[in-house]
Amino acid sequence: MANKILVVLEQRDNQLKKITHEVAKVGSDLANKLTCEVEAVVVGGDVNPLNKVGGFGVKKVTLIKNEELSNYSPSAYTKIISDFADEIGADILIFGNTAIGKDLAPRVSVKLDAGIAMDCVELNFSDGEIIATRPVYAGKALVDIKINSDKKVFVLRPNVFNPGESTESEAEVVLKAIDAPDLSTKVVEVKKSEGKLDVAEASIIVSGGRGMKEAENFKLVEELAEVLGAAVGASRAVVDAGWRPHAEQVGQTGKVVSPNLYVALGISGAIQHLAGMRSSKYIVAINKDVDAPIFQVADYGITGDVFEVVPALIEELKK
Amino acid sequence: MKIAVCVSHVPDTATKIKIAENGKTIDSNDVTYVINPYDEFAVEEALKTKEKVGGEVVVISLGGEANKESIRKALAMGADSGVLLKDEDERDSSSLAFALADEIKAQGAELVFFGKQAVDFDNSVTGQITAELLGFNCVSVAVAFNIEGDKVIAEREIEGGKEVIETKIPAVITAQKGLNEPRYASLKGIMAAKRKIIEEKNAISSPNKTEVVQMKKPHGKQAGKILGSDASAVPELVRLLKEEAKVI
Ligand SMILES: Cc1cc2nc3c(=O)[nH]c(=O)nc-3n(C[C@H](O)[C@H](O)[C@H](O)COP(=O)(O)OP(=O)(O)OC[C@H]3O[C@@H](n4cnc5c(N)ncnc54)[C@H](O)[C@@H]3O)c2cc1C
Ligand SMILES: Nc1ncnc2c1ncn2[C@@H]1O[C@H](COP(=O)(O)O)[C@@H](O)[C@H]1O
């Protein structure tokens, strides 16, 4: 049986990320089911506000603080989180499956001699054991896995677990300063893509495919994204053609996303593209080919010409 | 410098997945296996690094006899030698990494390239776990890599940008698309690969920490409504998004 759950929060620029709510909520729900304790930890500089995490059920959060840790450091974070988990006697750790989580969680799992389940989309119970469900083969199948080691690490796919509304509860915040972290691997610079919303973090995505005909026409995709407050995504065909950067590619060799709404414009829906977006909550497809496979996963479809339908859609949304 | 590359042998990404009778693995009949796409970037980066700093590139793969095909592919691209760590059993990432780390140590490699993810179980952890087991530094999901002496500068992809990372060898790098353009194996390379040695060893055993209880098909998404074939369907689409889906 579990003794204590540790939820590992994530910050960038000393701001907590949205995934924080999801991991906190899953951690506290799990603690209720297992009748064990739960607390949270975050590594960074002046991370603020932290008491709000209480709204998602976690009553105590420790900030392990050092100005040099505002940026991620694989070596330092691995040691700090593993030591902290040992110190408080945590035997279940929960991370988000983000750029940091994917790097950090496996390394912490080694230090703790824990089994790890990456990219979980469900956590269920069977005979008192936690069963994690995760997509494999690019989402073409799912596996239920069980971790048999005493310590367990679960890494949650972002935007899948619903954190619900925050309550008024506030968490107790504990400060722990540390000096001389192990910076043998450290981030010396963060290059941000100009003010753009990343597909991996957006709750709405508007993606364009080869049906947009040329790079220039992505203006239409960008315009629709703007009225929806969405990120712009792309199929591999248009990334390979050099119309859009790879960071925007959705799919098996791009990013795996699960936004609330995914709008596919002139995308056929090849299996490798579906791999990256089929877990979106709602999918809209606009494609002039009635037989395009994208319609098999779309909730709403229009079998028309993007150059006619998209401008009308932008007009309608602006109303 | 001794450089190692770990490659996995995986179903082609266009494969239709059928679940085997045991309900825990895929049915591998009629499945075409290829070198993991990300591992081609890893091989390319290893070769480029060898061209820059000199040394030798050894390709390591754990699995059955068939994995030799992926090793050969890397040898044809220009790697010097190969090692097949023989094991037919299902391994989880910890157990896999344990055996790979053992071999990397035996090879005396100081720089090791992995793919960022094997497109079978999509775990994206083997490089990081192996690095931690070896006590090597690690940069995962690299889109740029540079080595000067023992200093490594790499860039890794993150949400909304890139992180520039500085570290030192010994190091593990996991390759993301964009790191380079993998070269094609030339006819000469393919011929030469036939003469290169693939050493076979039994992979050292290590217990699994996780277990697959069952493999299942995703709850098939129902094809939805086609609302029309031109702009006249737009108002209905917007209404549904607002009132039924409530996503805008
Ligand atoms: C190893 C591997 C990995 C891959 N990884 C990815 C990946 O990560 N992401 C990815 O997206 N792909 C990936 N692919 C590629 C994938 O197989 C497809 O080739 C690609 O997704 C096709 O992109 P597309 O839909 O934009 O283009 P197409 O398949 O050419 O489709 C264009 C669509 O636009 C429609 N269209 C044309 N004109 C109009 C118009 N005026 N109005 C409306 N509709 C129009 C057409 O009917 C067609 O359906 C991968 C392939 C391999 C082999
Ligand atoms: N059986 C294997 N043999 C050698 N290397 C492997 C094997 N499986 C995975 N790898 C390496 O580990 C990387 C990440 O795999 P994974 O963690 O399974 O997604 C792959 O891109 C390969 O470089």
Image: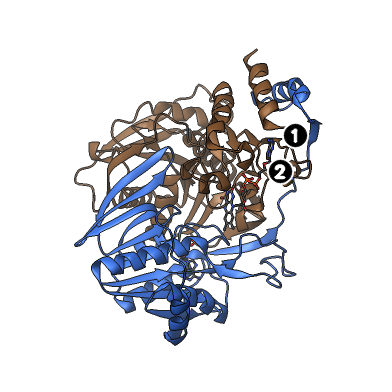
Chain colours: A brown, B blue
Pinpoint the chain carrying mark 2: A
Does residue B130 show up?
A: no
Image location (x, y in percent) of residue B104: 35, 73
Q: Which mark is residue A301?
A: 1
Rendered residue at 29%/30% (across/down): A46
Decide if residue B101 is on the left or right side of residue B208: left
Amino acid tagged 2:
Ile
Total label count? 2
Rendered residue at 67%/46% (across/down): A269
Cα gap from disc 1 to disc 2, whole angstroms: 9 Å
Image location (x, y in percent) of residue B73: 49, 74
Rendered residue at 43%/68% (across/down): B97
Location of the C terminus of chain B by quadrant is top right
Pinpoint the chain carrying mark 1: A
Q: Is residue B210 above or below residue A15?
A: below
Rendered residue at 57%/52% (across/down): A252
Find disc 2 in the rendering and name its residue. A294
Image location (x, y in percent) of residue A211: 64, 39
Categorize mark 1 by other alpha carbons within 10 Å: few (<14), some (14-19), many (20+): many
Decide if residue B31 is on the left or right side of residue A34: right
Decide if residue A316 is on the left or right side of residue A62: right
Q: Is mark 1 within 8 Å of ligand 1?
A: no
Amino acid tagged 1:
Gly
Q: Earlier in the sequence, mark 1 or mark 2?
A: 2
Location of the N terminus of chain B by quadrant is bottom left
Categorize mark 2 by other alpha carbons within 10 Å: few (<14), some (14-19), many (20+): many
Q: Quadrant of residue B59?
A: bottom left
Q: Is mark 2 within 8 Å of ligand 1?
A: yes
Q: Which mark is residue A156?
A: none
Does residue B41 show up?
A: yes
Q: Quadrant of residue B91?
A: bottom right
